[in-house]
Image (cartoon, rainbow, N blue to C red):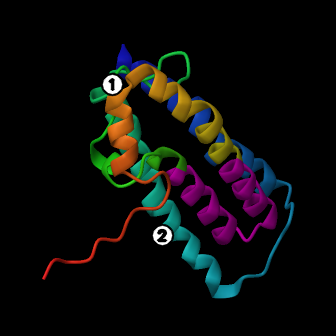
């Protein structure tokens, strides 16, 4: 049953953010750009973002015993997979996908949508999600928060 809920919420939330809204903006030809060959830089962003998003959904279900739905959140702090590098890889994946779509489909409107969702994700994480996770998971979340950055992975220098 958890797998079914995870799939349904993935279709609803990221499906709307990453597919439905960009498709509407692209279909209406809102904001056409001429990026020439640069447009092809969008494909790697989509190709990286989509599997990371799927991996996060699976980690939420398997490791966290929950879904990405606010009504059925994970019961445990998820630290594996992409969550080892950033605390919010699902949001990062969504922004990568939408940014890639903006480039590939040469749409400033989709690019603006990407900026809007990135700002909304940041506000949601800072004002709601992090305080909630701290309250729910206490020291386990605080330890995770101190050791893993919010958005951008740390570059570690090789030891000599």
The stretch drawn in magenta includes residue 113: yes
Front tag of 1 and 2: 1
In the rendered view, tell whether residue 72 sits above or below residue 129: above
In the rendered image, the quadrant that contains the N terminus is top left
**Location of residue 101 in the rendering, given as x and y in whole percent from the top left corner:** 64, 62
Q: Is residue 85 left or right of residue 18?
A: left
**Location of residue 78 in the rendering, given as x and y in whole percent from the top left corner:** 33, 35
Q: Is residue 108 left or right of residue 84?
A: right
Q: Is residue 10 visible?
A: yes
On the image, which quarter does residue 109 sit in? bottom right
**Magenta segment boundaries in residue numbering:** 92-119
Query: Residue at left 32%, top 31%?
Result: 140
Residue 76: numbered disc: 1
Q: Is residue 146 left or right of residue 99?
A: left
Query: Residue at left 27%, top 43%?
Result: 80
In the rendered view, tell whether residue 3 sits above or below residue 157: above
The stretch drawn in magenta includes residue 61: no
Q: Main secondary structure of the magenta part?
A: helix
The residue singled out by tag 2 in the image is 44
Mark 1, residues whose alpha carbon is within 10 Å: few (<14), some, or many (≥20)? Answer: some
**Location of residue 75 in the rendering, given as x and y in whole percent from the top left corner:** 36, 19
Q: Secondary structure at mark 1?
A: loop
Can you name the residue that lies furthest to the bottom here? Answer: 37
Query: Residue at left 40%, top 62%?
Result: 153
Q: Are the residues flagged by discs 1 and 2 in contact, CB closer than 8 Å?
A: no
Residue situated in front as seen by the camera: 136 or 56: 136
Going from the N terminus, do you reach mark 1 or mark 2 first?
Answer: 2
Q: Secondary structure at mark 2?
A: helix
Residue situated in front as seen by the camera: 135 or 34: 135
Mark 2, residues whose alpha carbon is within 10 Å: few (<14), some, or many (≥20)? Answer: few
**Location of residue 29 in the rendering, given as x and y in whole percent from the top left corner:** 85, 61
């Amino acid at each position: 049953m958890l797998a079914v809920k995870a799939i349904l919420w993935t279709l609803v939330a990221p499906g709307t953010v990453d597919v439905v809204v960009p498709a509407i903006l692209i279909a209406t030809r809102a904001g056409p750009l001429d990026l020439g060959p640069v447009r092809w830089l969008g494909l790697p962003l989509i190709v990286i973002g989509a599997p990371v998003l799927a991996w996060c959904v699976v980690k939420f279900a398997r490791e966290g015993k929950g879904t990405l739905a606010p009504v059925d959140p994970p019961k445990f702090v998820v630290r594996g997979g992409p969550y080892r590098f950033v605390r919010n890889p699902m949001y990062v994946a969504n922004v990568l996908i939408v940014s890639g779509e903006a480039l590939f489909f040469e749409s400033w409107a989709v690019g603006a949508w990407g900026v809007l969702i990135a700002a909304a994700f940041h506000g949601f994480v800072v004002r709601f999600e992090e305080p909630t996770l701290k309250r729910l998971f206490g020291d386990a979340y605080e330890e995770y928060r101190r050791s893993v950055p919010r958005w951008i992975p740390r570059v570690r220098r090789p030891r000599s």
